[in-house]
Structures are given as structure tokens and as C-alpha cells.
Image (cartoon, rainbow, N blue to C red):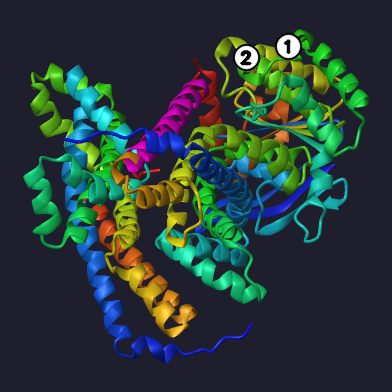
Amino acid sequence: MNYNWNWGVLFQEPYLGWLIMGVQWTFAVALAAWVIALSVGILVGVGRTLPSRPIAFLCTAYVEIFRNVPLLLQLFLWYFVMPELVPNDVGQWIKRDMPNPEYLTAVIALGLYTASRVAEQVRAGIESVGSGLTNAAFANGFSVTQTYRYVLLPISFRLIVPPMTSEFLTIFKNSSLALTIGLLELTAQSQQIAEYTFNGFEAYTAATVIYVCIALMATVVMQVVERYTRIPGYMGSK
Amino acid sequence: MFNFDFEVILNNLPFLWEGLQLSLLLTGLAVIGGIFFGTILALMRLSGILPLSLVAATYVNLIRSVPLILVIFWFYFLVPLILGRPIGSFYSALIAFTLFEAAYFSEIIRAGIQSVRQGQGQAGQATGLSYFQIQRHIVLPQAFRNMAPILVTQGIILFQDTSLVFVVSLRDFMTVSSIIARTEGRLIEMYIFAACVYFVICFAGSLFVRRLQKASIA
Amino acid sequence: MIKIEKLSKWYGDFQVLIDCTTQVNAAEVVVVCGPSGSGKSTLIKCVNGLEPAQEGRITVEGMEVTGRGTDLTRLRARIGMVFQHFELYPHMTVRENLCLAQQKVLGRSRDEAVAKTEALLDRVGLSQHIDKHPGALSGGQQQRVAICRALAMDPIAMLFDEPTSALDPEMINEVLDVMVELARDGMTMMVVTHEMGFARKVADRVVFMDAGAIVEDRPTEEFFGAPDTDRAKDFLSKILNH
């Protein structure tokens, strides 16, 4: 193996700046997409469990479509195809005047894709609360809305904190796909450094270490959330 | 406002078919390799031997916290460096996918092994079976039966993940579609067509998973 | 044949076995009883090394279970064990359940193993179920199969860990009958059970445990006739007077 080690390259300009920029973009994409994923995902997930057949069907269709097409392709559909299919002047505006097209596209694509995964967790959480409690709530005279509001959602949201942690991590990892439409997030920056300096080992190690740190941070944050939301004696008791 | 041009798809079917074959081949090999190494990792983690479980846990957690694209970049860079010669995109991608997915499979397999009642292992011990005989004949068959639906689901995810070889221009179905889209200037047709193909395959897979789940409950 | 000397075991800070000493002679039947959580199951699992103990020693026919470097696998092959929840392998048929260890551990040929399997099943009246999976059998039938699985290894002694406590009441007797017959044939047996009728009928000695310690260890007649300790009296009155 013939390789020139040079860890110092990571702390030279412009490469250090590139890495920092990369981290910022990664956070910007992941966090914004997470907001979309959570809000859409919760709506769709709840929708799948509703007694109304049309709503449940639409929400199921959403999940199946977004889950069964690779994220990369979805990104391309939003970026290359969508502007062509909307009315002309909207398409023109997207192509010519919309600020930060790569960023917005990445956020929307990643957010809506992750929403389908969040929806599945929400649905599983609601279903695992079980019909016993639902019946008890109905027997108490609660309406469907009240049952969700006071019984099903408060319990199931706590139940799904652990799987949501892994979705939260996944969204950081998946934000790397934005590099395919030219957004220079962390992975893209490390690859660019590798190409400019031929110090691939150092560049990729830097990116890896940063991703591991993000994962650790996210895990810690979610553990705190879990601790504060735990219902005594109901779960995690095994 | 827009005419969908089917011709561009029909004209390029052989090229697309080659790409799809490569995607499926990569998926198949990576699933086999991933389950093989994943099983080893899971057994290491559950072995109760501290150094072994520590190594396995570190590997799994490390891989699971970095994006697949970064792992692909890593192996494209590392494999030729270690071997001293280039071995071709396909093999680099195959190694990257196998080792990446092994971490995910190992978590599934670990949960599967833990889902087998502890008494089963003890019953094997009580008749004098060795550790490997117990795993081979008693624990793993039951574990794999319990987790078959999740393994197939992971296989579907892996199939979608193979589209990421796009970043190193390996000619899978995704890359081929994209090449045609650009050279023929038919982005809309090609990307929608590709999405439909992926959807049909993955949706069929998830219907199969549902059947497996029903079978395992019955 | 089985000798337990000053055995102590801890789970973390909690001591589950305190200085336990007893023995089972060849062809003897010893029943171990006591309130739940008294350590009976732990004690019996120590005998074939399924649970390690920190202090004391156990020997089986002179072989030390607790010693370092003991070939536990070989030892276990010679001691049969029956579990509370049967622990039949659900993915295998009854035949495969009985044949697996015979072939893999004892190295018997397929034909030998099957012959042995058929003979044993015949003895407990389950021949017609040989090709079924355990899930298709009743609890009583499963436990009889599990006993056969242990017997298929030609054990020198049998350990029973609450063999009837997971069974519906109407199935308890079919299992106990098999055990009584085994005892009459001269099998060395150590049985953890609450079935005092069974103990009276076939046990040579009764070991009574409470809170991890062996409180009484006496011939059956004496134990039932005039228990020494208040704890044993209390236990017997709770379990017998219905």
C-alpha cells in the first residue's frame, strides 16, 4: 500500500471551510425535511387507522407509493420532472426564479419520502395500543376525535419514540443523496476534498467521524425525549 | 401540454433490461452475503465473549451511523488501495453493499435469535448438543422462520438502495435510465418509467411480505 | 450418584442458593419442593451445568460438574432433563425432535435413532403422532414426547423441572403415570414438583427448600408424617388442605 498520509489537510483552507459548509447543509436539509416528515407522516399515519374507508385508502396509497420507489429516483422526479408537469408559468418560475432549487427540492423529496416511513411507525403505534382501550374510550362516551386526542395518540406517540429515533438518524444519512442534484452537503464535500487532495482516507474519515457524532447526538436527544415521555409500568418494563 | 413518448422506452428496452439484471444481481448477491456476515456478526454479539461482542457492536453501530453513499465512496477508494490494483466498479460496489447491509441484517438476525425462547437452547444443552449444533439445528432455523418477513423487507430496501451505485456510474437500472434520459433528452419519460418499474417490483415484494406475515401468524 | 455439596449461587447481590447440600443415590427418586422463588429450579439446573454456581461442588458419578475443564457436553448427554415448558423444537416433527441429539451427539445411525424413537413413543402411547409437529399435540402429549427425548439418550439419571406445572389439570396424570413407571423401572430421578401425591407414591426422599436453602432433607414418610420445621409444616398445610 502506497499512500501519503496528511491529516493536516483537513485543517487547511479551503478544505476545513468545505467540511463546515457541508455539515451546515446536512443539518439544514435533514432538519427541514424532518419537519415535513413528522407533520405529513403523523397525518397520513393517523389517516390509515381512521374508520373512513376513502381516507384510509388514500393514506395507504401514499405510503405504498413513497415507500416503493427509491429515494434517489424520487429526488430526480421532483427536480427534473415535476417542473415540466405543472402549468407552464409555475414551471418557468421554478426553473428560473425559485431560490435555492437544489435545497428546496432535496427537503421536499426527503421530507415526503420519510413521511411514509414515519406514517408506518405512527400506524403501528396506534394499532399496538389495542382495541381494548379504544373500546373503553368509546364506552366512556368519547367521540372518535376525542378518543384519538386523549387516548390513542398520547399513548402511541410515546410508544414510537424508539423507532422514531432511528428514522431521525436515517434522515441525516439520507440527506447525502442531495449530492446527486448538486447540493454540496457533507458527503459531497468529503468526496470533493478526496478528489482535490488525493487524501481520500483523511477526507472520508472526517466525514465518517462527523456522521458518527451526529448519530450519537441524535441518540442522546431521543433518549432524553424517551425518559420524559415514558409511562410508568406500561412499556419498557420488560 | 405534454406528449408522453413511449418510443424512447421501447427503443432502449435491451439496454434497460441489462441495467435491471445488474440491479437484481447486485441485490441477490448482497442479500446472500449480507445475511451470511450478518449472522456471524449477530452470533458474535450474542456470544457473551466480550472482545467478540465489542468488535461486532462497534462495527454495526459505525456502519449504521454513516450514509450508504459514503460507504460506497470509502470502498471505491479503499479496495484498489488495499489490493494494489483496480477490480472494477461492480466488485467494489458488491463489497460495499455486502458489508454495509451485513450491519443491518445482523440487527434483524440478532432480534430473531432473541425471539427464540431461552429454554430451547437449554433443551439442546441438556441433551449434550454443542454450541454450534444448537445454533445450527435449533436456534437459527426458528429465528429465520420468525424473521422471514423482515428479511424480505430488508431485501426490498436493499434493491432500492442499489440505485445509489449511480454515484459511481455503475450501470444498474437507475444509471441506465438516467443515461438514456440525458442522451435522448427524455427526462420525463425515463424517470417516470423507471419509477413505475421500481414500484411494481417493490410493491409485489411487499405483498409477498404480507403473505409471509399471515402465514407465520397462522 | 448425584452429589451436591455446599452449593451457593448469586444473581448479582442476590443469593439464590445458600449452602445447599444433598445427594441422589442410584435408583433413588428425590422430590424437591418448596414455595415459588425458593431456588428449586435453579438447583436442578445446576446439576447439569445449565446454571453455573459460584461456590461449592456437584459431582455426577464422580465427574465434577462445577469443575473447570469438565466436558459439560458429554456429561449432559448422560443426564436427561425435562422442562416446565417442554421446550420441544417447534420447527421439527416429533421424530426429528427425538432423533436430533441421538444422531448428532451419540453418533447413532438414522435407523438406530428411529428404532429407538419408535420404541419409546410406543411405550408412552404416542406412536401415531410421530410425524406431527409439537404444536399439533396437547400439553400432556408434548411433555410425554419431551420425556422420551430425554430417555432416547439412555440417561443414567433424569432431572424434572416442574414437569406438570404448565399443564391443564386433566393432563397432569398422563405425565405423572409415565414418571411413576420410570421410577418403578429403577431410574435415578430428581424431580422439582408441587405434586405431593406423586412424591408420596414414589419418592424415597423429599428435599424441602425455602429462600434458597435446603430446610429439610428426609425420607418421604417422615417428611409427610412429621415435618421438622414450621416452614415445611406451613407449606404442607397450604398445599395439601383444600
Q: Is residue C75 above or below residue C70?
A: above
Q: Residue at x 30, y 55 (%)?
A: A171
In terms of depth relative to the viewer, which is nearer, A37 or C41? Answer: A37
The three-letter amino acid code for the residue at tag 1 is: His
How far apart marks 2 and 1 lie (CA) works out to 9 Å
Quadrant of the frame with the N terminus of chain C: top right
The three-letter amino acid code for the residue at tag 2 is: Ala
Q: For this view, does A156 lie left or right of residue B36?
A: left
- In the rendered image, which residue does mark 1 sit on? C129
Chain letter for mark 2, please.
C
Q: For this view, does C140 lie left or right of residue B179?
A: right
Q: Residue at x 29, y 79 (%)?
A: A18
Tag on residue C136?
2
Q: At numbered mark 2, what does the secondary structure look like: helix, strand or loop?
A: helix
Pointers 2 and 1 in contact (C-beta within 8 Å)? yes
Q: Start and end of the magenta stretch?
A: B190-215
Q: For this view, does C128 lie left or right of residue B96?
A: right
- The crowding category of the residue bearing disc 1, from other C-alpha atoms within 10 Å (few below 14, some 14 to 19, many at least 20), is some
Q: Position of residue A230 (x, y in %)?
A: 25, 47
